[in-house]
Amino acid sequence: MEQQRCDFPFPFIPYDNQSNFMKSLYSVLQNGSLAIMESPTGTGKSMSLICGAVAWLKDFEEAEMKRLETKANSHAQETTSSNSSDDWFNDQFKLIGKKHEADKAKKALREIQEQLQQISLYPNELKKFKELEELRQRNRTVPNKFQENKLAKEQHILDSDLLLVDGETELSDEEDEEDVEKARLPKIIYCSRTHSQLAQFVSEIKKSPYSKDLRVVTLGSRQNYCINEEVVGLKNSNLINERCLQLRQNKSSTKPSGAKRQKRENCPFSCNSNGMKFIRMSAMTEVLDMEDLVQIGRKEDACPYYATKASVDDAQVIIAPYNILLLKESREAYGLNLKGNVIIIDEAHNLLETESSIHSTEVNLVQLTCAHSQLAQYLEKYKTKLAPANLLKIRQLLQVITRLTSMIGDKSVKSEKVFTMNEFLNKSELADFNLLELVNFTRCSRLAQKLNGFTIRFNPTLEPPKSKKDETTPKTGFHSFLNKVNKKNADTNPPAQEDTASGISIIDSGVGINPILPVLNLMNKLTCQTESGRVLCLSGQHHSLIKFVLLNPGSMFADIVAEARAVVLAGGTMKPTWDVRHELFNDSERIVEHFFGHVVPAENVLPLVLSNAPYPCEFDFSFQSRNNREMIKALGRTLSNISSVVPHGIVVFFPSHKYLDQVYRIWREESVDESLEKCKKLFKEPDTSSQVDQVLKEYAAICKPPGNGAMLLSVVGGRLSEGINFSDELCRCVIVVGLPYPNIKSLELQAKMEYQRVKFKSVAEGKDPASEYYNNLCMKAVNQCIGRAIRHQNDYAAMVLLDKRYKSPHVRSALPSWIENNLSISKDFGSGFSMLRKFFFCKKTEAGGSDQK
């Protein structure tokens, strides 16, 4: 019988939408569904997720403990009841089965109770830790030993550090422990895209009624958690991971160095087991975010990264970025077991694109050149000291890089090709190699880390090593090609510079310090047996590369769906959902959809399709028509008219950076910008991320009364279209110019659409799957822009859609429900302008005239 719940602990009296959201979420988790849940931004979605999911978790934990207790005691009851039966044999057979089930329940119950008992002791143990820490601080007369023992910035690398030892085993991320799966109560695994979104979710948990009674841990990368300055100073995430693993492996080992034995370096922070235990207990006693944990780690001289990983088993709620959940290797590294647990993925409108991006990789021509050069020089340096098996593998790697380079071809000739996995392997002749064996060799031998050490020590040139034969014999084939590329690099790139932060000489060639890493990543992808993988080979003056793309992200998401008890995809704008249903959830019978309205009253929003300019000019910003100069001038006059009735801030979204630049240039040539400036000060989305904060700060200052306000020209999918709240005066009107369809000529997009057309033809119900996918990419971007304006219940704004195509039923049906249900379509500019003027006049009247232009 399905368990239901009608009331939920909440920090205030919830709105109807919030109550309905929590009820639906509770039902989804109880039934083990695959849910798509849309609740507009500003409706308290995060708090509703927390209260609805944690209420279910608490109820389920209580019910599960009772179930196990009943099951554990069932054997004795069955024994008593079976004494009166005449069928002794069958009764005994059933009893054996019942006893087995009861024993399993007893074992599970005991394991859970032992875990909970241990966790209950954390507050007292933590108190003792703090008392000892205070005593240690009072008695301290010398600097902290861990500060004294920090690794020296200057690295002394010996030949013995760089050699590939025959039979060397892979670096392990953990200590040797028994891999025994114990019974555990279900967990909630919450994921979002950015660390700032995760921090915001933790902040909401702290405000919730469960803040004092919930065990929460936030997982993150070494880059986020590492407090060892020598390691985190390497900047590159791959190098940080390699160095951390090496130091952790060196924790208690020594190795010969000539006639002497040299003690290996280790990381004092990951060796501080007491300090890491302190962090772990702190995390399970109080809700802490990533910054809190790093601060405790610095205070205790202990590693927050390994401490948080150790907390996964005890936590009730695990918070993690997308990549930790979506990559199987990451889940295993963090000990994240999905079986029976609940997965909540927030901001899931871009999940498909994120999944595809995470599983894609590329390597460019410069990286291939540098990797071959460094590996060849490494081989030349140590060929007499390496084991024969390792020599063979390195030579094979050099051949693989050569064949990959040949697939790019001459970069002076522009070329774009797409291959299936088998086509690429055969065309490049890589099918002759056991790539999986080579990938395992590089991982187990730590080739990338040792090649990096070789580069640090010797700072090799980009050119391959020369032998006496090379000096007298002209080079042909690949070496000749390498020399040409390297000569160009030498002419265009500055010489090697000293990185004063780490004391490491780096080759500033645009490839980072370890160009072998993208090569190995590509090789690893080429070992995948997936029919939805494609390899793109692009060559040209500005980009010459090989890229692996995953056309069906659902193939990598399938194990998450299979293992988890329930999967919830939540977001402010989840429509359209066709691709999620078919690609991620594979049309499962478990799929449910819930769409909730906005908490703002309908009279606080004015969604409007405006397809005409002030004089007869129909807006059609399709790719074929958007360059019409007269229409661009009419757009400027339309925005000028709208600015005259909209108070404070207006945010305008254009289809692309290129088109925004084109429009802005024409406006300046025709003095349209001067007309706009009379009503609103113009701001334009900056070209670099570093300028965003400054532009937003200046824009916000002018939007506030009593000034005329400002207009911010932005780009769909740009730096301002997602994750930034334009609430209240910052955006009283959001305008979307045209429909932002992606570039149909993109080779990757064409491959994706062709795959969609073939793969989902049978379930398309008369529709073209490729067109559905293409339209969905566009409308999800539009919906994100629309959602920037309304951020809370008392907010109000107009949403103006400038293009005749918005009148199409197909386009309108892809808008969020709270927009679609209130959408007005103007017959001409006059009627639309009249609606805008009336809307803002009413708002001005309601505010008592305080909301001035």
Image: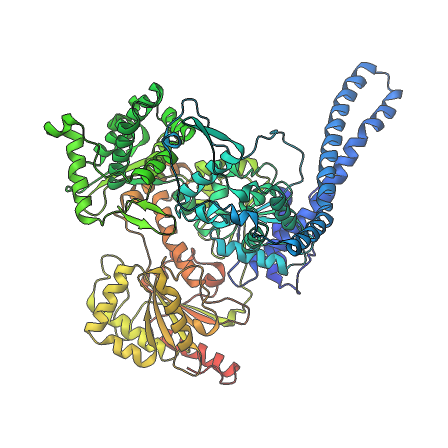
114 is higher (above) or lower (below) than 36: above
* Residue 140 in the figure: left or right of residue 399: right
Image coordinates for residue 525, horizontal then vertical, percent: 37, 33
Image quadrant containing the N terminus: top right
**Splitting the image into 4 quarters, where does residue 644 fall?**
bottom left
Q: Is residue 138 above or below residue 824?
A: above
Front position in the image: 576 or 45: 45
Residue at the limit of the structure toward the top, as seen here: 89
Does residue 289 appear anywhere in the picture? yes
- Name above or below for residue 107 compared with residue 118: above
Q: Is residue 485 left or right of residue 553?
A: left
Q: Dividing the picture into quarters, in which one does residue 406 lie?
A: top left
Q: Nearer the viewer, residue 656 or 216?
A: 216
Q: Number of callouts in the render?
A: 0
Q: Nearer the viewer, residue 808 or 18?
A: 18
- Place of residue 90 in the rendered image (x, y in percent of width and height, measured from the top left): 78, 16
At 28% from the left and 51% from the top, the residue drawn is 743
Q: Residue furthest bottom?
A: 849
Q: Residue at x 59, y 60 (%)?
A: 17
Q: Nearer the viewer, residue 649 or 6?
A: 649
Residue 824 coordinates in the image, percent (x, y): 42, 68
Query: Does residue 82 sit above or below 318 in this rendering?
Result: above
- Left or right relative to 252: residue 640: left
Q: Visible in this render: residue 548? A: no
- Quarter holding the C terminus is bottom left
